[in-house]
Each structure stands twice: as C-alpha cells, then as structure tokens.
Image (tube, rainbow, N blue to C red):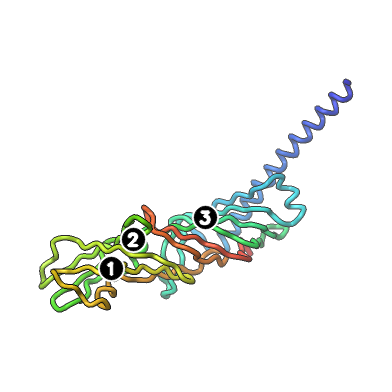
Amino acid sequence: MRALRILLIVVVILGGLFVIADRVAVKFAEDEVADKLRSTENLSSTPDVSINGFPFLTQVAGGELDEVEVGIDGYEASTGNGGDTIRIADLSAIMKGVEFSGDYSSATAASATGTATVSYDELMKATKSESTDVAPGVTAKVVGLSDGGGGKIKVTVRATVLGVEYPEPIDVLSSVTVENNDVSVVADGLPEIGGKQLAESRIRAITDFQQTIDELPGGIELDKVEAAKDGVEITVKGSNVKLAG
C-alpha cells in the first residue's frame, strides 16, 4: 500500500511537471509566431497569438497545431489606390490545422475564419470630400456615416441650394455589401433637396461609393459585411493562410 501511494505521488508530480513544461513551451511558441507575423506583415505592434488545445507538446510532435487565434489592432490594409491605406480597428482570426517548421519560421493554416472592424470615420475616406453639383444651383457632399439600424448605413449629406446651405442635414439609408475585396455602399432610396427630386445618377455620385480593402494578412479575404454601431463588421475567411514565412 505504501509503495502504491509513493507511485501515485510520483505520477502526480510528473504530471504536474509535464503540464508546466507544456505551458512554458506553448508560451514560447506563441511569442515566436507573434514575432514572425509582425515581421512578415510589417505590423506596427506585436499581434496577440494564442495556441489552443492541450497538450501542446503532442501537437508539436505531430507537426500540426489544432487551432491558433490571432488578433491584430490597427492593421493598415491596402485600398488598391497607390500607397493609400485604410485602418482596420481590430482584426481577429481563428486558424485551423496549422502546419509549421521546427523553428516557427514558417506556418500555414489549412483554413481561417475571423472578423474585421472598420470605423465609419475610416470608411469616410472613400466618399467625396468636396461639394459636387447634383442639379442646377444645388451642390452636395457626404459629411458623415453612422449606424442606420437594421444592418443599414446612414449616409448624412449636406446640401447648398443657390449658395445657401440647406437648413437640415439629409440622411440616406444605404445597404452595404461585399464582393471580392470591395465594400460597396448603395442608397436604398434617393432624397429630395430643396423640393427637387434630383437626377438619380448625379445624387448617387454622392451617396454611393466603394472601398477596396486588400492585402490582408496571410491572404485572407473579405466574405460578408454588416453595418454595426461603431463601423462595419466584416467576416473574413481563407485557406492555406500563411502566418509566417
């Protein structure tokens, strides 16, 4: 009986040491992947990386991690317009089936899903900043974007009629969609300004716009988009996504 107790104690101690070693190893791997990702994507800050699943060491032995979570704050994505960028407030993704090299210099996920948030202030970069003629004696420009409720974006327009600013801002509810890497905002209906129903093509030149969001980390792509309280929330996905290397 005494020998059995000693054996149980030894097993518990060894198990505890294995858990400690496993957690130390996973923390080292997370730091290595985060550093490689920062370098590969030229990020301004080190991303958050969490390797899920236990035990970690058995995953390492198999050469593949079950799941890796990555979080990046303030990612500057390309707009496809020269060197212009658009800031993604937060980008998070869950990577599945991550194969890696022994020194973590390269890591590729079989699949990835996640979300990205772009603030309305950032999305405003795609609108026309200067007043544009929309009818004889009438000019207009977009002055704000916000949550219109029901998954719609509220596009706020200021107009000038015969040189006098229209007394109230004009709000237009718009639908937001994504195709390939382009986010499109299209008005559901067109407003009247100064009692005039304006030519559709002219007013849509103000209210409707498109924003490209390209070159996301690892080659992930835009999937779905929806208007939310603080900006548009975008679902992203990808396959054979490179975390590093």
Q: Residue at x 37, y 53 (%)?
A: 230
For the residue marked with disc 2, what is the amino acid?
A: Ile
Q: Secondary structure at mark 1?
A: loop
- Name the one closer to the observer, 137 or 125: 137
- Report the disc number at residue 189: 1
- Name the one closer to the observer, 55 or 156: 156
Q: CA separation, marks 3 and 2?
A: 23 Å
**For marks 2 and 1 on the same chain, the one whose residue lies earlier in the sequence:** 2
Question: Left or right of 137: which side holds 74?
Answer: right
Question: Left or right of 190: which side holds 62?
Answer: right
From the image, tell me which residue sits under label 3.
92
Figure quadrant of residue 175: bottom left
Q: Residue at x 53, y 53 (%)?
A: 71
Q: CA separation, marks 3 and 1?
A: 34 Å
Question: Left or right of 141: which side holds 238?
Answer: right
Q: CA separation, marks 2 and 1?
A: 12 Å
Q: Quadrant of the C terminus?
A: bottom right
Q: Secondary structure at mark 2?
A: strand
Question: Left or right of 61: which side holds 220?
Answer: left
For the residue marked with disc 3, what is the amino acid?
A: Ser
Q: Secondary structure at mark 3?
A: strand
For the residue marked with disc 1, what is the amino acid?
A: Gly
**For marks 3 and 1 on the same chain, the one whose residue lies earlier in the sequence:** 3
Q: Position of residue 11 (x, y in %)?
A: 81, 32
Q: Position of residue 143 (x, y in %)?
A: 25, 63
From the image, tell me which residue sits under label 2.
153
Q: Residue at x 57, y 61 (%)?
A: 39
**For marks 3 and 2 on the same chain, the one whose residue lies earlier in the sequence:** 3
